[in-house]
Amino acid sequence: MTPDNLHSKDGFGFFREASLPLSIALVIPVGVLLVLLGLLLFPVNLGLIPFSPDGQLGLLLVIMAIQMLALGETPMGQYRRSWLLIVIGIAFAAMGIFSCIVPGILTGVIQLLLALLNISGGVILLGKRFLPMLHGAGDPAAEPAALPPILKRLLVTQTVLNVVAIAFGISMLLPGLVPGTVIAGIVVINGLLLFVLVSILLKLG
């Protein structure tokens, strides 16, 4: 080990190497984006500041693409990083970058794509989590053991995240159905829940 490596690991304060897994590190900018976006949507809905929906949708799609390319993480769960997933991730990144640079062309397509991904992802993950419990209901041999408190918090946080993702997808699919301030609140809650998820995962790690 070189002296530079020793110095980076044994530093102090902000100069110390951060033991933060890549999977968790990629969740943090998503949380920052959603909280900031939700807070900005309040003055946007009041007409106080301008808003670029193309930039919002493009940035969301680019971050999703990075998660797919780096970890195989998708709104519908984590999968093996096959070449198909890599190609889809590159296509998503290209669409998101194009939307940020050239507004007004892919807005509707990306909005529909993100809406369907959030809704289907939330439904699929909720189904994977609770359908086995429903199938085993009433069977004493299939009753799960009591979960530790931190795992219960993880389960509740993931469940609420899935429900919020479905609500966010519906609000994007039917923009006139939900008031703008409610959408802003949903986005902020989604971002804050991601920070709660990060803290739980760090404790479990």
Image: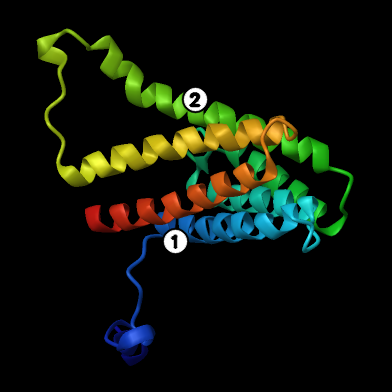
* Crowding near the residue tagged with mark 2, few <14, some 14–19, many ≥20 C-alpha atoms within 10 Å: some
Q: Position of residue 136 (x, y in %)?
A: 22, 12
Q: Quadrant of the rendered structure where residue 155 is? A: top left
* Residue 195 higher or lower than 3, as above or below: above
Q: Residue at x 36, y 89 (%)?
A: 4
Asked whether 73 or 162 is in front, the reply is: 162
Give the residue number, with chain letter if any, for mark 2: 123
Residue closest to the far top: 138
**Left or right of 95 on screen, residue 145:** left
Real-space Cα separation, disc 2 to disc 1, in angstroms: 25 Å
Secondary structure state at the residue bearing disc 1:
helix
Q: Position of residue 134 (x, y in %)?
A: 29, 13
Q: Position of residue 33 (x, y in %)?
A: 58, 59
Q: Which mark is residue 100?
A: none
Q: Position of residue 86 (x, y in %)?
A: 61, 43
**Left or right of 36 on screen, residue 153:** left
Give the residue number, with chain letter if any, for mark 1: 25
Q: Quadrant of the rendered structure where residue 55 is? A: bottom right
Q: Residue at x 10, y 13 (%)?
A: 141
* Residue 161 higher or lower than 121, as above or below: below
Amino acid at dot 2 = Val
* Crowding near the residue tagged with mark 1, few <14, some 14–19, many ≥20 C-alpha atoms within 10 Å: few
Residue closest to the far front: 46
Amino acid at dot 1 = Ala
